Image (cartoon, grey):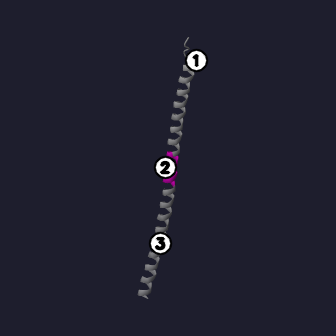
């Protein structure tokens, strides 16, 4: 007599597939969050670098203006 697989076996197989799908979705979500965090960190880093460069440019411009003013006063004297 031929035996057929039990319904329990089929049920367990379905549940395992569901579990694997759920785990894959959760992993994809976690990867997406990691990507988003990395992008935010890169944007913050770029903003900090830009602010530092802007501050350096402002200081340099002030210094150049002071040099020009001193040169002008020397020419007048």
| Side (left or right) of 16 relative to 70 | right
Q: Please name the residue shown 41% across and 87% down the image.
A: 75
Mark 3 packing: few (<14 Cα in 10 Å), some, or many (20+)? few
The span shown in magenta is 35-44
Majority secondary structure in the magenta region: helix
Nearest to N terminus: mark 2 or mark 3: 2
Judged from the image, the secondary structure of the residue bearing numbered disc 1 is: helix
Mark closer to the observer (2, 3): 2
Mark closer to the observer (1, 3): 1
Judged from the image, the secondary structure of the residue bearing numbered disc 2 is: helix
Q: Where is residue 45 in the image (x, y as percent from the top left)?
A: 51, 56
Q: In which quarter of the image is the C terminus?
A: bottom left
In this view, 4 is above or below 16: above
Whether 64 is among the magenta residues is no
| Side (left or right) of 76 relative to 56 | left
In this view, 46 is above or below 22: below
Q: Position of residue 42 (x, y in %)?
A: 50, 53
């Amino acid at each position: 007599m031929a035996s057929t697989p039990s319904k329990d076996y089929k049920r367990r197989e379905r549940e395992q597939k569901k579990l694997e799908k759920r785990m894959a979705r959760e992993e994809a979500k976690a990867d997406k969050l990691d990507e988003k965090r990395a992008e935010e960190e890169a944007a913050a880093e770029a903003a900090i670098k830009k602010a530092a460069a802007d501050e350096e440019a402002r200081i340099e411009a002030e210094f150049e203006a002071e040099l020009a003013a001193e040169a002008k006063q020397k020419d007048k004297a």
